[in-house]
Image (cartoon, helix red, strand yellow):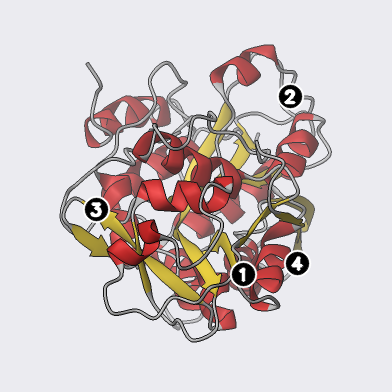
Amino acid sequence: MKISRIAQVGAVAAVAALALAGCAANETPAADSTGEAPVSDLSGAIAGGGASSQEVAVAAWTAGFQTANPEVDVTYDPAGSGAGRESFQAGAFPFAGSDRAFKIEEIEAGPFDGCVEGTDILELPTYISPIAVIFNVEGVDTLNLDAATIAGLFSGEIANWNDEAIAALNEGVDLPDLAVTPVHRADDSGTTENFTDYLFQAAPDAWTSEPDGVWPLDSGEAAQGTSGVVSAVAGGNGTIGYADASRAAEEGLSTASVQVGDEFVSYSPEAAAAIVDASPLEEGRAATDLAIALDRTSEEAGVYPIVLVSYMIACQEYVDTAAAPIVKGYLQYVASPEGQDAAAAAAGSAPISEALAEQINAAIDTIVTE
């Protein structure tokens, strides 16, 4: 039987109890009696990288953290989730962003060269955002699509926009006689893994390829990164793709409403957060590894099923001890209400719930800084 995510708060909190007590040097200091925040004693530089979906949010987090810690420099290379995980494993990055957590077998195989051998890694779901199904079809602004039809569009089984499967879901919409051009990620992408996981769970008869960060089919047009997919869809006619919803909104692209039960649901941060809170943690992981087992088939009201949960990944104990307090302080800011609000304002992401924040902060507290 699966244990609910909220019920697991206690398990993570127990790990946090092992952390050092008192005011850590890396925590942003509180204002003094004059109302002015004292100067942070954190200094140094860290460089991370990974998921391009988080790029806008990471920029907001970095700006806020560096304002509070002026002697710290944080950089982030949005090279994609796969590149981020590989660089973190090799010890090139002390933290990484990834649109999927490491698989248990990947963790067991290791190695994680930047982490002290025998210690756990942290995987923190700090960025929650819907994945939008974006399209550019001249004369069509909105569409309703179910999972099987989306699968057909991306597999090539549905090759024309006036196909009966699309028309049946969109009565009164003038669908053109126009070829479908599906656009997918060329790089190893957590966005792709989340999107194909949705298709695999919600339309198993129409989509038989197991979830993977690498696009499993030869059909369609490949584009590099989130920006590449958005640009390819925006620059064509008859194109359809998938991308972090914040980037779709920036470009003003048309997006599909997705069938959930008997309704069609448009993406929103609130709908993305709803499905995360309704899903359990994956079993068999360390208490600091908060990988979420998303339920893409939920029919609860207000749930949007194509959601991306992007993780911040870090070591519990670092070989390079100088990086530890900076990473710890940065992650504390990322998970804070201020950090989550900054990401929501900049990227349209969904702030994490209080229950999830409690688990995340308990895991961050275990990072060894002495």
Residue drawn at (35%, 66%) of the image: 167
Residue that mark 3 sits on: 260
Q: Is residue 166 left or right of residue 224?
A: left
Dot placed on the residue nearer the N-terminal end, 2 or 4:
4
Tell me if mark 3 has few (under 14), some (14-19) or many (20+) residues whose alpha carbon lies within 10 angstroms of its own.
Answer: many
Q: Are marks 3 and 1 in contact (CB under 8 Å)?
A: no
Dot placed on the residue nearer the N-terminal end, 2 or 3:
2
Marks 2, 3: nearer the viewer:
3
Residue that mark 1 sits on: 56
What percent of the width, then of the height, locates residue 160? 54, 62
Q: Is residue 208 left or right of residue 87?
A: left
Q: Quadrant of the N terminus?
A: top left
Tell me if mark 4 has few (under 14), some (14-19) or many (20+) residues whose alpha carbon lies within 10 angstroms of its own.
Answer: some
Type of amino acid at the residue the image marks with label 4 = Glu
- C-alpha distance separating marks 2 and 3: 40 Å
Marks 3, 1: nearer the viewer:
3
Type of amino acid at the residue the image marks with label 1 = Val
What percent of the width, then of the height, locates residue 53? 61, 59
Type of amino acid at the residue the image marks with label 3 = Val
Q: Quarter of the image holding residue 96?
A: top right
Callout 1 secondary element: helix
Marks 2, 4: nearer the viewer:
2
Residue that mark 2 sits on: 112
Residue 359 bears which disc, if any? none
348 shown above or below 355 = below
- C-alpha distance separating marks 3 and 4: 48 Å
What percent of the width, then of the height, locates residue 219? 69, 46
